[in-house]
Image (tube, rainbow, N blue to C red):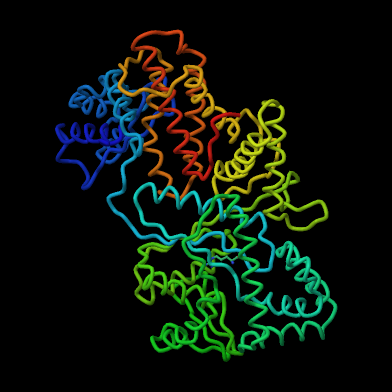
């Protein structure tokens, strides 16, 4: 596909600047920016370039804008630009241009106007990463859903993305699990549903250790035995990991999330000792009170916060493992970039390991992509009624059950199988959309009623819009036939075409600051524009080019909603 509309306008605007009398005064590398118009009353796109320049050149912004406009050649693309307010330049696209863009988009079934990146990277995406034998709670849901969506977007843009589930499979929790396994395990419960049983053990031992000093010591010695390679403990540990993975996989299947690798913390065990030696030899790490640390004298806020990489008892730490992980990803997986989708409280940890990586001369582009908390309706951390952390598996089950209610009400005569399938799509889609429609740093309130509402910025609303785009072809009795005449007459049609053409500008913008919520907001606007078109423009009652164009609009809207929701990891349904 050709350039985006914003790019086309930008080329012409910059050409106008270069042709104007102050071309020689332009600051070096100055590029005039074009933005989508906030208020369509004044045009489709706008630029504040005249205001920015006027300030630098000490000129009157409206006057400067006028001169630029005189040199601007809109051609078939847009009408003569207008000046508004303090010196904004507004652009309105020609209907003929929208029609030809619409044709191009219809023919571009696979990419829908979105170009692939010309700076392809190999990216390792580190997300989800729950701790084995501990509950995977709703905090992990944010990482899983965000990471999956960012992975999908990056792949669509042409990057090579390897998703890696860096599970916590070597933590201190294994001391308790091992003791519990030997003393409290209910084999039958473990066989039928392992995760809750492992969790029960963990919770019970954890509670007991609170007032039992001797037990704490016993757990510790189980852990030491495991770390020293004791056969029995290793066998239990392995079984534990295996069972946990099966349980986790069920959740990922339901979420339709896939990992290329599951290289958990334990995978790096053998690499930790040599890594620490290397860091000491290169002068990056040093001894302090028997422990090995990396200090950051160059950063004021880290003055008293060294990164600990080997304890005085010889044990290694979370940071040590993460440093070894960076080496592996760069050397063995060829990573140009590594993305960590992890909660905001781990900011300091990642600051430190990124700095150490730089000290070692590594050049990979390391990105910490943090997120906030999920709150209950009381604005406190989300908890179950009994005060426990909320389990992800339970959330998903409840979402689907509630969605089933909607389906029963809307479509009582669908078959049971159909109802179940649609409820799964709506339920899981709603949980994902509630996450992805928020800016990731926002602490959002988890509320079933808002997330499952048929109106508003929700998954059910978007899915319903998609279903409408499909329903018309069922009514017509045939699929969309390409090649019809295109003619845009109503404003609602032009608005919708413009929105659809902006898919090409929206998808790459998601990666600018790792914000799938910009894509969600866009899809919502598409659905609203489609809804307006639907109210204003009859389709099947019309004839000729008008009817064909409107059918094509339904088709293209459907394709973009399906592709866009797919990039959020949300499946569509043909009926609901
Ligand atoms: N297991 C960790 C936790 O649940 C998250 C791991 C994130 N990834 C990493 N490479 N440190 O907090």
Q: Position of residue 405 (x, y in %)?
A: 72, 34
User: What's the residue at 52%, 86% (across, down)?
Assistant: 292
Q: Residue furthest right?
A: 211
Q: Position of residue 68 (x, y in %)?
A: 22, 28
User: What's the residue at 67%, 44% (across, down)?
Assistant: 445
Could you tell whether 480 is left or right of 435 in the image?
left
Quadrant where the image shows the N terminus:
top left
Residue 281 figure quarter? bottom left
Residue 380 in the image: above or below residue 492: below
Looking at the picture, tell me which residue is in the foreground, 564 or 193.
193
Could you tell whether 33 is left or right of 68 in the image?
right
Looking at the picture, tell me which residue is in the foreground, 30 or 330.
330
User: What's the residue at 70%, 63% (across, down)?
Assistant: 195
Residue 400 figure quarter? top right
Q: Quadrant of ligand 1?
A: bottom right
Quadrant where the image shows the C terminus:
top right
Could you tell whether 117 is left or right of 167 in the image?
left
Residue 550 figure quarter? top left
How many numbered marks appear? Answer: 0
Looking at the picture, tell me which residue is in the foreground, 66 or 96.
96
Q: Position of residue 406 (x, y in %)?
A: 69, 31
Residue 174 in the image: above or below residue 116: below
Q: Position of residue 377 (x, y in %)?
A: 74, 44
Looking at the picture, tell me which residue is in the foreground, 522 or 287.
522
Could you tell whether 375 is left or right of 481 in the image?
right
Residue 500 in the image: above or below residue 318: above
């Amino acid at each position: 596909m050709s350039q985006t509309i914003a790019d086309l306008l930008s080329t012409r605007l910059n050409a106008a600047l270069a042709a104007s009398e102050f071309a020689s005064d332009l600051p070096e590398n100055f590029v005039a920016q074009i933005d989508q118009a906030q208020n369509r009353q004044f045009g489709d796109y706008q630029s504040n370039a005249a205001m920015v320049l006027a300030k630098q050149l000490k000129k009157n912004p409206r006057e400067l804008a006028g001169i630029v406009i005189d040199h601007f050649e809109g051609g078939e693309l847009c009408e003569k630009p207008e000046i508004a307010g303090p010196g904004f330049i507004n652009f309105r696209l020609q209907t003929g241009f929208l029609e030809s863009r619409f044709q191009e988009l219809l023919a571009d079934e696979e990419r829908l106007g979105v170009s692939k990146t010309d700076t392809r990277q190999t990216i390792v995406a580190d997300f989800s990463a729950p701790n084995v034998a501990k509950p995977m709670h709703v905090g992990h849901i944010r990482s899983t859903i965000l990471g999956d969506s960012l992975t999908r977007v990056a792949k669509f843009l042409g990057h090579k993305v390897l998703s890696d589930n860096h599970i916590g499979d070597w933590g201190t929790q294994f001391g308790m699990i091992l003791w519990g396994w030997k003393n409290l395990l209910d084999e039958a419960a473990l066989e039928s549903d392992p995760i809750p049983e492992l969790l029960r053990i963990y919770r019970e031992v954890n509670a007991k250790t609170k007032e039992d000093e001797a037990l704490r010591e016993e757990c510790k010695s189980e852990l030491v035995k495991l770390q020293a390679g004791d056969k029995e403990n290793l066998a239990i540990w392995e079984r534990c990991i295996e069972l946990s993975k099966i349980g986790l996989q069920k959740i990922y299947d339901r979420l339709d999330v896939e990992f290329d690798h599951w290289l958990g913390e334990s995978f790096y065990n053998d690499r930790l000792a040599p890594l620490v030696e290397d860091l000491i030899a290169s002068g990056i790490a040093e001894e302090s009170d028997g422990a090995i640390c990396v200090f950051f004298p160059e950063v004021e806020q880290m003055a008293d916060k060294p990164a600990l990489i080997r304890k005085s008892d010889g044990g290694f730490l979370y940071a040590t493992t993460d440093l070894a992980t960076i080496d592996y990803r760069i050397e063995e997986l060829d990573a140009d970039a590594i993305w960590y989708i992890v909660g905001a409280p781990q900011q300091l940890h990642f600051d430190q390991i990124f700095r150490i990586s730089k000290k070692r001369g590594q050049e990979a582009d390391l990105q910490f992509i943090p997120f906030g908390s999920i709150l209950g309706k009381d604005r406190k951390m989300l908890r179950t009624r009994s005060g426990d952390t909320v389990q992800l598996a339970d959330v998903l089950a409840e979402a689907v059950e509630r969605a089933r209610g909607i389906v029963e009400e809307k479509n009582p005569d669908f078959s049971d199988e159909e109802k179940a399938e649609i409820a799964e799509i709506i339920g899981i889609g709603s949980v994902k959309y509630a996450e992805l429609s928020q800016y990731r740093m926002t602490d959002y309130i988890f509320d079933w009623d808002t997330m499952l509402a048929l109106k508003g910025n929700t998954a059910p609303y978007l899915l319903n819009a998609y279903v409408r785009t499909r329903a018309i072809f069922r009514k017509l009795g045939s699929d969309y036939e390409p090649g019809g005449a295109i003619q845009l007459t109503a404003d609602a049609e032009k608005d919708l075409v413009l929105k659809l053409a902006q898919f090409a500008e929206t998808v790459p913008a998601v990666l600018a600051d790792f914000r799938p919520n910009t894509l969600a907001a866009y899809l919502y606007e598409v659905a609203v524009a489609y809804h307006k078109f639907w109210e204003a423009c009859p389709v099947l009652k019309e004839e000729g080019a008008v009817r064909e164009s409107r059918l094509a609009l339904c088709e293209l809207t459907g394709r973009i909603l399906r592709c866009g929701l797919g990039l959020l990891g949300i499946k569509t349904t043909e009926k609901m």
